[in-house]
Amino acid sequence: MTYHGSVKVGGAPAVRELAELMITKVAVGPYDNDAYLLRCRATDEQLLIDAANDAGTLITLVGDGGLAKVVTTHRHQDHWQALAEVVAHTGATTLAGRADAEAIPVPSDVLLDDGDTVAFGAIELRAIHLVGHTEGSVALLYDDPKGHPHLFTGDCLFPGGVGNTFGDPAAFDHLIDDVEHKLFDVLPDETWVYPGHGNDTTLGAERPNLAEWRARRW
């Protein structure tokens, strides 16, 4: 089945099969959060991005293969509601951006800084620190050696714009600058974007709109 990235709470997950990595996307909770389970095809080791809600769904998704790590993309509570239960069930190592970790009630075993590597099995992700939606938000980049890059952006980049900066002009400027310079300036149009809510996009689909986003200030 062709991967489409469109999922609904209570509906079936969307599964993407890459040469070395499996990506399973599921929607959970009252805010339609996206959670992503990544599995290394060489070792079956797994990593979860955002234990957002509905621990039962996420634990079922993990299955009997165990869970090595959980990365929380940022401190907002809709992205960690199931974290405590998932970690208690799986014993997974917890990771979060350094500046957001203290606000997440489950302690972070690993604090992430810009450029850090997050490894599981034979897979490596790169943490990209993006400031503006929160102080410590992190995106995760999988630079597929046999295909295009895959980018998990939390609430920093969506189809149609950057994340909410809550009316703070300085925060907006910081976020749009980080997104433009750390993502659009260095990654190709083919880069697939997996956001924290809603449907996927690509950098190529969004790139023509950067000037409009800056002008409208959201």
Image: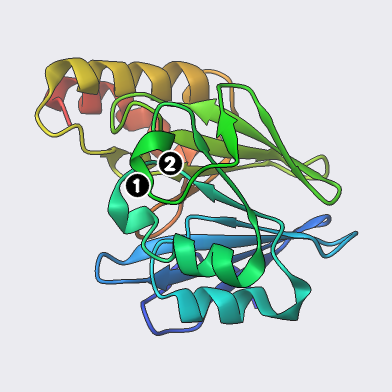
Residue 50: which disc? Answer: none
Rendering coords of residue 210 (x, y %): 32, 26
Asked if residue 217 shows in the view, the reply is yes
Residue occupying image coordinates x 77% and y 73%: 65
Rendering coords of residue 82 (x, y %): 42, 66
Residue at the spot of label 1: 159
Q: Report how far apart the C-alphas of labels 2 and 1 lie in the structure.
A: 8 Å
SS of the residue at dot 1?
loop
Q: How many marks?
A: 2
Residue 205: which disc? Answer: 2
In the picture, residue 52 is in which quadrant? bottom left
Rendering coords of residue 189 (x, y %): 55, 34
Q: Check contact, mark 2 vs mark 1: CB within 8 A.
A: yes
Residue occupying image coordinates x 46% and y 62%: 84
In the picture, residue 190 is in which quadrant? top right
Asked if residue 25 shows in the view, the reply is no
